[in-house]
Image (cartoon, helix red, strand yellow):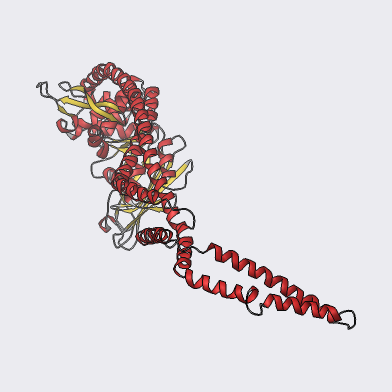
């Protein structure tokens, strides 16, 4: 709900403030007084573009600021959070136009762009100049009207949950299938690589061990020769080292008991003898392990060749690297199989969800088809009352092939303006004034059932008078019982129905500069203003009495 509107330095407005009530507010004044200028300034809040031509004082910026009570506006506050803006029960929206024509917009003192501004303010203000044409072109609005009368709130909630799940599953499936498609291109090659590695069947460190073993085999004769030579020197020469050490040990032992220190030396040489004796035995063992088998050499060479080939192919260094790649390939191929299973399970979920979704959509469709005739009957009755006796509304409900976010129906409000038998979409068939009255009839019918933002009608009563104007006034008042309504009017029958009456006028300041002013009319002022709307500047007593009766 709009609590306060302040306009400064816009067109012929120096500065003015309006504080509308929460029900029906009417704005009256002579043609050219500035009523439409006030709407133009409000349009800046709603995201309209502007330039420096709107500045009355070219040396100061234009500022339009509106304060809204958004305590109960859940949709608006949800979008505030989505846009990462401050959420409070009161929202202040400000638009500034600098002297160079550049404009800035703020929501709760946070700068926003025009796209954000428009996205948010359309949830706060429904301006006839905008919604009159667009709402009846927008399927979601038409759907909301039918659902409001059909009392489809619970079904819509259930459907929305299922539809969101449907979208989520579909999105997941698309992503998984795309992933599967990409993987499939590589699967055959990965399988080939894995089969190659599995066929090679390398064990841990096998390449490194084969490399070392082959080196030994290649130098086997030299190794055996050296081992034999060393062992010969230790055990089998003309004077074997081990035998000589044994003799030395025995000789020292013979004098150990007559000379201090010899015993210690004898023990050290004895240790060397024992150690060399062990060395000789180990040399013999090593010699026995050396093979001269040509078949073994060939087998090792073949394994090494295969190992080197695979190492080079996969751009790695060791057997461990190859085994890691083998494991990863196995994991990837297993994941491909798991992906197929996941897609299959998700497809089953999608089918099950789709069956539920279609069932709820069918219930919604049935309810809508039941409600449509009631809506058309009521709206057509109201159209006759507001000066459109030849106009008829018809609601066409056609089935969609696939679920949409509001069901599986396409709803179109059709109009035959002159009983011609030719039905066209309302937004194509109705004139601007007719569109406003059609919207008024529709909104008054759904006032109790639908949440609506602040509704602004600009001369909804244009081109009508008498009883039709009186009925428009009744409808606006009824609508104002449930929603905040602001109506610019030239009809006394409409002006009298407002709970708060604003009078827009021009006034010269001390410098004889003309500026638009606005004030709230009190009881006697309203009587005079409405009488003047009927009888001119100097109303008769009869006009005054009629004004009192209208104000009733």
- Residue 38, compared with residue 424, is above or below; it is below
Point out the residue furthest to the front here: 238
Rendered residue at 54%/62% (across/down): 289
* Residue 129, quarter of picture: top left
Task: Identify the image quadrant of the C terminus.
Answer: top left
Residue 473 visible from this viewpoint: no
Q: Nearer the viewer, residue 390 or 372?
A: 372
Q: Give left or right: position of 258 versus 221.
A: right
Q: Nearer the viewer, residue 508 or 423?
A: 423
* Residue 398, quarter of picture: top left
Point out the residue furthest to the right here: 258
Q: Nearer the viewer, residue 168 or 227?
A: 227
Q: Give left or right: position of 41 versus 413.
A: right
Percent across and percent down for residue 522 are 40, 35
Residue 372 visible from this viewpoint: yes
- Residue 445, compared with residue 25, is above or below; it is above
Percent across and percent down for residue 355 are 33, 23
Q: How many marks?
A: 0
Q: Nearer the viewer, residue 52 or 191?
A: 191
Percent across and percent down for residue 70 are 44, 38
Rendered residue at 64%/66% (across/down): 281
Percent across and percent down for residue 390 are 15, 21
Rendered residue at 9%/22% (across/down): 420
Task: Identify the image quadrant of the N terminus.
Answer: top left
């Amino acid at each position: 709900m709009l609590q306060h509107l302040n306009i400064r330095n816009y067109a012929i407005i120096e500065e003015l403030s309006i504080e509308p009530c929460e029900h029906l507010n009417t704005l009256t004044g002579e043609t050219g007084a500035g009523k439409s200028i006030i709407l133009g300034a409000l349009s800046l809040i709603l995201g309209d573009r502007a330039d420096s031509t709107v500045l009355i004082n070219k040396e100061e910026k234009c500022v339009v600021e509106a304060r809204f009570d958004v305590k109960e506006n859940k949709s608006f506050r949800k979008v505030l959070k989505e846009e990462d803006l401050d959420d409070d029960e009161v929202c202040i929206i400000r638009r500034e136009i600098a002297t160079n024509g550049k404009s800035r917009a703020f929501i709760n003192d946070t700068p926003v762009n025009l796209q954000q501004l428009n996205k948010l303010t359309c949830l706060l203000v429904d301006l006839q100049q905008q919604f009159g044409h667009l709402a009846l072109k927008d399927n979601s609005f038409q759907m909301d009207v039918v659902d409001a009368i059909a009392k489809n709130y619970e079904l819509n909630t259930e459907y929305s949950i299922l539809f969101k799940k449907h979208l989520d599953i579909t999105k997941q499936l698309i992503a998984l299938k795309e992933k599967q498609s990409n993987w499939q291109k590589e699967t055959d090659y990965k399988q080939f690589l894995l089969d190659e590695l599995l066929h090679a069947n390398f064990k841990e460190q096998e390449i490194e061990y084969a490399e070392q073993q082959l080196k030994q085999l290649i130098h086997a004769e030299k190794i055996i020769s050296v081992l034999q030579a060393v062992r010969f020197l230790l055990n089998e020469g003309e004077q074997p080292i081990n035998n000589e050490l044994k003799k030395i040990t025995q000789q020292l032992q013979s004098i150990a008991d007559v000379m201090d220190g010899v015993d210690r030396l004898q023990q050290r040489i004895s240790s060397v003898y024992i150690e060399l004796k062990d060395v000789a035995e180990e040399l013999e063992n090593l010699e026995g392990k050396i093979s001269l088998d040509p078949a073994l050499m060939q087998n090792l060479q073949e394994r090494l060749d295969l190992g080197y080939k695979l190492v080079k192919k996969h751009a790695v260094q060791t057997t461990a690297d190859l085994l890691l790649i083998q494991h990863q390939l196995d994991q990837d191929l297993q994941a491909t199989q798991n992906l197929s299973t996941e897609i299959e399970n998700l497809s089953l979920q999608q089918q099950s969800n789709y069956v539920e979704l279609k069932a709820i959509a069918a219930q919604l469709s049935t309810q809508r088809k039941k409600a449509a005739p009631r809506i058309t009957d009521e709206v057509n009755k109201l159209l006759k009352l507001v000066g459109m006796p030849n106009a008829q509304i018809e609601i066409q409900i056609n089935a969609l092939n696939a679920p949409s976010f509001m069901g599986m129906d396409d709803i179109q409000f059709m109009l035959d303006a002159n009983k011609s038998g030719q039905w066209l979409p309302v937004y194509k068939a109705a004139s601007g004034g007719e569109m406003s009255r059609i919207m008024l009839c529709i909104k008054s019918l759904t006032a109790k059932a639908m949440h609506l933002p602040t509704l602004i009608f600009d001369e909804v009563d244009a081109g009508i008078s008498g009883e039709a104007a009186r009925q428009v006034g009744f409808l606006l008042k009824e609508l104002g019982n449930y929603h905040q309504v602001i109506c610019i009017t030239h009809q006394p029958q409409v002006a009298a129905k407002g709970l708060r009456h604003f009078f827009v006028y021009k006034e010269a300041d001390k410098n004889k500069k003309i500026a638009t002013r606005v004030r709230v009319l009190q009881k006697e002022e309203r009587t005079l203003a409405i009488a003047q709307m009927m009888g001119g500047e100097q109303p008769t007593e009869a006009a005054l009495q009629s004004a009192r009766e209208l104000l009733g």
